Amino acid sequence: MDLGDAWTRVLAGLPPNQRAWLTNSRPVTLHESTAIVAVPDDFTRGQLETRLRPDLERILSESFGRDIRIAVTVDPSLDPELQPQAPTPPPIREPLRTEGSYQPTIQSALTDPDQSHTQPYRQPAQQPIAQPPQEQAPSYEQPAAQQYAPQQNQPFGQPTQQPFGHQSGPDSRPPGAPAPAQPATEAQGEARLNPKYTFETFVIGSSNRFAHAAAVAVAEAPGKAYNPQLIYGDSGLGKTHLLHAIGHYVRSLYTGARVRYVSSEEFTNDFINAIRDDKASQFQRRYRDVDVLLIDDIQFLEGKIQTQEEFFHTFNTLHNANKQIVISSDRAPKRLEALEDRLRNRFEWGLITDIQPPDLETRIAILRKKAATERLTAPPEVLEFIASKVQTNIRELEGALIRVTAFASLNRQPVDLSLAEIVLKDLIPEGSKPEVTSSMIMGQTASYFGLSIDDLCGSSRSRVLVTARQIAMYLCRELTDLSLPKIGQQFGGRDHTTVMHAERKIRQLMSERRSVFNQVTELTNRIKHQAKQQ
Ligand SMILES: Nc1ncnc2c1ncn2[C@@H]1O[C@H](COP(=O)(O)OP(=O)(O)OP(=O)(O)O)[C@@H](O)[C@H]1O
């Protein structure tokens, strides 16, 4: 049975008063257990998401003989009143008013084998989703956003005349492309986006194609395409990267869009501080007066009743105002057992997409892109070797490339296979992977440098101590799944930006100073050895 047939059964199986809501709706596609349904407006979407959902999902599940859930997207072109009555001069297109608005993005992402991970992100922008395929695709020099006229009730201000991805720095802009509307630093500071995490730097493969396509659709039509979008998957597979990429792309399409990225840990800390300092209304403004809220690692809210309550209201306020919410999690919502039902239930209103570990080809493509953006030289066979050794976590994959190139640069040796083998031999032991904890890292680092754990967590800024602390933070980032805020907490309650700085600093020092490279390598060996003994 295909989705069209199943939809006919849905229509036949509903009482007339419910069926009326579906008159102008359309099934779009079925991806695994998610059926995407397009409706003409937000009001109808609300009805489907709340009143009709149980019946729709029941009939669809019966038709397919397995559990099916629906995700509802708004496509105003389905509204019969908006159909053109007579030929008129071609208007400037709006993202949501054309036939097949988001659908081609998602569908082609799932079915088009040519949309491979080796293609740069430039491709989708040249053929934006609002553009029927037969129309001539604009050149890259013609900014993608130029094709979008402001929407009615446009909450985000005017789309800019910019290509996406310009925030990734002047280097990433093609020659002749216009300059960003706002200074990149100001834009990023406010939205708190990492300039490196854009769609341009994201490599698409079969493991993340659906999540990527949905993320693009959401960024092109915030609050309309899928709300919320939830991205889940194991650590280090690119969830944070996609959240930031959505933020950048929204900002490049809609001038003045208020985008806020926050990890759930920061949200929690912010909330606790707001209560302590009696600044609840400031807190609420910070998270509710936004057009797009990107909230990372929602699993952190498990068991935190009061913060969940606050997030529930934040969610409702934003959703009711058609503001976009994007959530990431390390598990599917169903498996977030210590999260309140009403929150999990809201997460299921939108589109749930997962990211799987990348296959070998994708891992090689990621390394190739990483080497190019970081200006690291490594021949293809070395990239393939690293990709074959590090199979699950992309953060580890990148870490391995950094170590190999750093070792080569310190020794003034070319990056070749034998060198890569030496460096990775200790980094990636054969057999099962022992679990490394932050206390092992801190304990080993402290004893290696002749310090105490208190020293590592304290405030002394002596040079040896600062380097030791930064190395320990770097290793926590590379060898554990702990998030930035969590690592900060372990080191005397430091801010997550301190951990980010430490990570960058040690990466750089490893390729400049042999002593630092040796210290990191020796410590890694000791820590892994200890982990194996446990
Ligand atoms: N498809 C991809 N293309 C390019 N880089 C990627 C891709 N996926 C992940 N990365 C890179 O891998 C690193 C880890 O990704 P990220 O931090 O987004 O993972 P995550 O899923 O959010 O992990 P965690 O749950 O631990 O926070 C980042 O440097 C990111 O840029």
Image: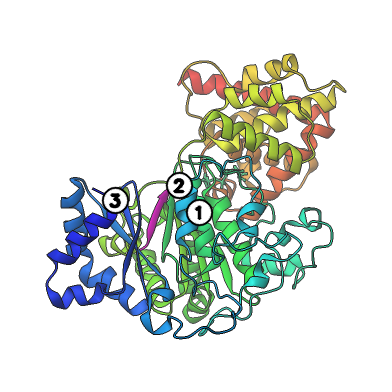
* Quadrant where the C terminus is found in the figure: top left
Give the side of residue 478 with respect to residue 55, left or right.
right
Q: Residue at x 21, y 77 (%)?
A: 20
Closest to the observer: 75 or 33?
Answer: 75
Magenta part, dominant SS: strand
Q: Are marks 2 and 1 in contact (CB under 8 Å)?
A: yes
Residue with the mark numbered 3: 334
Query: Where 259 sits versus 206, above or below?
Result: below
Name the residue at 63% across, 16% down: 425
Nearest to the observer: residue 496 or residue 254: 254
Measure the alpha-carbon separation of dots 3 and 1.
Answer: 23 Å
- Badge 3 or badge 1: first in the primary sequence: 1
Q: Which residue is mark 2?
A: 110
Q: Nearer the viewer, mark 3 or mark 1?
A: 1
Residue 183 position, x and y percent, is 77, 69
Q: Which residue is mark 1?
A: 213
- Within 10 Å of disc 3 (Cα), the crowding (few <14, some 14-19, many 20+) is few
Front one among 390 and 451: 390
Magenta stretch in the rendered image: 350-354
The answer to whether residue 23 is left or right of residue 90 is left
Is residue 194 visible in the rendered image? The answer is yes
